[in-house]
Image (spheres, rainbow, N blue to C red):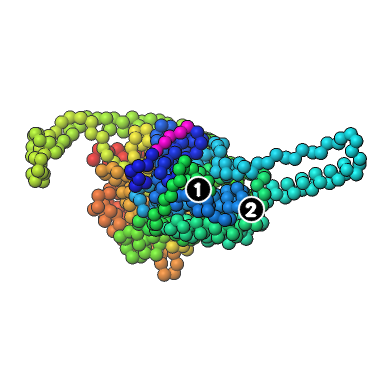
């Protein structure tokens, strides 16, 4: 249906690659046994923020691979010319040159159909992104594009001349000299062929995986890559198939010095095996048993997969950076606003990208620990907001919000286990208590009935007369989601931070055991910068290992509580489908922050702003409950309850930090019983 061809035939095979000749699609869903590669599937889920629906379900993975491959080939039928221009191009004078042209065309065509797929069609981006990342994360050896198209380039090594009886010394010396010259010529040829392979690998990674931050290319390729990058991007966004092939020709004309004149040699391109799909679709010979011609449709690609037409990160509808990931050898790739805090790596110290990073990143998902000096890390791109994204006071208009999900620190596993053991009685007690609340029988109201005990007046207009209601006894599990927001300002340093950390661990263990939706976020404002930083320590539907991040809670900077609460309301609305949303706030004082001389957020103005935020959010249906850390002892006399009472309508005072977990869990119990 997607290909708009009613006479299209679809074939499934158990060997080879997937491709199309314009009127047939040949699919190998089991290619490389990707559907059973748990490590690659798990890593793909991690990179794309997906739940573990594929790594634990090979059949579902196989279905999705089949669908994604079918979408890819159907897009070729729609937009690619058959046969390709390589078949009639005078540049393809040798099989090696024809193969080089077809690989360049393959890279551009794949990038274009993925770009037009996510620009023109709804819901295709999910499949294209997933398969592209799965191929990258997989390290299962399989025959790839470059190995296949250059298979004819493998030549036998000339035998070393053997001494024969009756041959004089002069003839032997001449034969040795000829053999040495042949060996030198072969070595020069192989070196040139490998340089061509490096170029193709680099440009495929550049165009098809723009989320990769590649090191500088080898010096011998620097000029070629600089001159051809604009042509690759132009081709990937060009809506006309003939003009796209013109870009292929212009690229080949630039890199022609890299293409050896002979047809012998050997090419080993492991990394391209994960990047390109079926080369038969783009080959000069064609794959149709009978002559077949079809012109691809013209279409406008508004953006490339992963990026927009300018190569910038894709923005969601609300202006946030989308949930894309950037891989690079020194960790997180920042947005433009963070380039100074996270400088680019030194390209001279990084070897040419050879695809090995797929194995390195995939290993992170299978291990219980990571090395602090690991060569490669995987982190989510920072998502960004500004105050203009919310209906808050104008004082927040120029303030940005960074929302980041830190990588899991497996070094904290033992410390987390020890903390749970120290509080196991509290955890067990509240697990049991909440379980009893959730499983207790209560009066359950059923409405939209044809018969019942009473009439619901506002449903009297129902055309199906479903305006009756009845009450029965049963288990009515509350549909509630909790967001715990922890004050991460500098005043929390010391015992308050430690108490908040322990309380968040206990809360997470209790709620997780009872399957209650929740997330835990630390919020702070950076002094001297128009910036808030929110760290999602545990997300909704989090993987189990995310809980270790609760021990990374820091105390620095100030708070801008009004704006943070507006963000919390939206976060709950986007991430949770619960009927009731509750924000639990742990705080130790009034919010305070300054970005510059013109922006000072201090009491009493900050208190009034936060109070207005609480009032408006509560009126819209999200309940907010706060705990004031009124920690009082001989060494630290401190009280903030009366100050925070100006902000929060529902406020609890904690004067003994040892009781904080119990108070927090009692609040949760009350909300579940409301």
Q: Residue at x 27, y 32 (%)?
A: 437
Q: Closer to the camera, 239 or 618?
A: 239
Q: Residue 260, image x and y in percent? A: 66, 52
User: Is the residue marked by circle 2 packed among few (<14), some (14-19), or many (20+) residues within 10 Å?
Assistant: some
Judged left or right of residue 177, residue 272 is: left
In this picture, which residue range is highlighted in magenta?
10-14
Q: Is residue 133 above or below residue 368?
A: below
- 566 to 71, vertically: above or below: below
Q: Residue 625 magenta-drawn?
A: no
Query: Dot 2 corresponds to which residue?
Result: 259
Q: Position of residue 252 (x, y in %)?
A: 58, 57
Q: Secondary structure at mark 2?
A: loop
Horizontal and vertical percent position of residue 81: 44, 52
Residue at horizontal 47 percent and vertical 59 percent from the top: 243
How crowded pointer 1 is (Cα within 10 Å; few <14, some 14-19, many 20+) is rated as many
- Mark 1 sits on what residue? 282
**Mark 1 or mark 2: whose residue is earlier in sequence:** 2
The C terminus, quarter of image: top left
Callout 1: SS: helix
């Amino acid at each position: 249906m997607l290909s708009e061809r009613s006479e299209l035939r679809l074939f499934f095979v158990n060997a080879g690659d997937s491709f199309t000749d314009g009127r047939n699609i040949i699919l190998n869903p089991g290619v490389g046994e990707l559907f059973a590669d748990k490590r690659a599937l798990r890593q793909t889920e991690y990179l794309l923020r997906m739940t573990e629906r594929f790594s634990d379900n090979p059949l579902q993975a196989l279905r999705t691979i089949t669908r994604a491959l079918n979408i890819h080939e159907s897009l070729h039928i729609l937009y690619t010319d058959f046969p390709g221009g390589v078949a009639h191009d005078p540049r393809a004078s040798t099989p090696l040159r024809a193969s080089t042209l077809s690989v360049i065309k393959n890279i551009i065509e794949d990038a274009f159909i993925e770009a037009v797929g996510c620009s023109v069609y709804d819901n295709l981006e999910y499949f294209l992104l997933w398969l592209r990342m799965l191929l990258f994360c997989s390290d299962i050896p399989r025959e790839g594009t470059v190995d296949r198209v250059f298979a004819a380039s493998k030549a036998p090594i000339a035998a070393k001349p053997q001494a024969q009886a009756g041959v004089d010394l002069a003839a032997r010396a001449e034969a040795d000299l000829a053999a040495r010259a042949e060996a030198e010529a072969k070595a020069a040829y192989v070196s040139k062929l490998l340089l061509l392979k490096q170029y193709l690998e680099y440009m495929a990674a550049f165009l098809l995986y723009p989320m990769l931050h590649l090191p500088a290319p080898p010096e011998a390729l620097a000029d070629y890559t600089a001159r051809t990058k604009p042509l690759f991007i132009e081709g990937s966004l060009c809506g006309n198939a003939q003009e796209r092939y013109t870009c292929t020709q212009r690229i080949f004309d630039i890199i022609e010095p890299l293409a050896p004149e002979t047809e012998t040699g050997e090419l080993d391109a492991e990394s391209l095996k994960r990047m390109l799909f079926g080369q038969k679709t783009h080959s000069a010979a064609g794959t149709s048993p009978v002559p077949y011609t079809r012109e691809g449709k013209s279409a406008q690609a508004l953006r490339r997969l992963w990026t927009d037409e300018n190569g910038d990160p894709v923005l969601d509808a609300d202006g946030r950076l989308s949930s894309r990931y950037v891989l690079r050898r020194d960790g997180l790739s920042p947005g433009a606003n963070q380039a100074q805090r996270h400088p680019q790596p030194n390209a001279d110290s990084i070897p040419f990208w050879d695809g090995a990073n797929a194995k390195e990143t995939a290993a992170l998902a299978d291990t219980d620990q990571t090395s602090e000096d690991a060569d490669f890390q995987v982190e989510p791109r920072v998502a960004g907001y500004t105050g203009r994204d919310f209906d808050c006071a104008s004082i927040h208009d120029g303030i940005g919000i960074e929302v980041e999900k830190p990588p899991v620190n497996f070094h904290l596993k033992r410390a987390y286990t020890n903390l749970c053991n120290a509080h196991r009685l509290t955890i067990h007690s509240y697990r049991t208590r909440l379980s009893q609340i959730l499983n207790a029988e209560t009066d359950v109201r059923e409405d939209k009935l044809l018969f019942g005990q009473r009439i619901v007046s506002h449903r009297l207009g129902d055309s199906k007369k479903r305006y009756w209601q009845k009450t029965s006894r049963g288990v009515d599990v509350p549909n509630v989601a909790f967001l715990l927001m922890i004050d991460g300002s500098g005043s929390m340093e010391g015992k308050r931070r430690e108490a908040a950390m322990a309380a968040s661990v206990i809360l997470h263990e209790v709620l997780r055991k009872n399957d209650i939706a929740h997330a835990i976020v630390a919020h702070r404002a950076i002094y001297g910068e128009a910036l808030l930083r929110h760290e999602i320590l545990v997300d909704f539907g989090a993987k189990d290992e995310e809980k270790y991040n609760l021990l990374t809670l820091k105390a620095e900077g100030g708070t801008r509580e009004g704006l943070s609460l507006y963000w919390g309301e939206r976060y709950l609305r986007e991430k949770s489908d619960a009927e009731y949303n509750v924000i639990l706030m742990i705080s130790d004082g009034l919010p305070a922050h300054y970005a510059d001389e013109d922006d000072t957020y201090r009491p009493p103005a900050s208190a009034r702003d936060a109070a207005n935020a609480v009032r408006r959010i509560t009126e819209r249906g999200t309940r907010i409950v706060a705990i004031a850390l009124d920690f009082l002892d001989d060494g630290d006399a401190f009280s903030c309850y009366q100050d925070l009472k100006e902000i929060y309508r529902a406020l609890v005072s904690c004067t003994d930090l040892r009781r904080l977990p119990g108070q927090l869990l009692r609040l949760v119990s009350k909300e579940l019983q409301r």
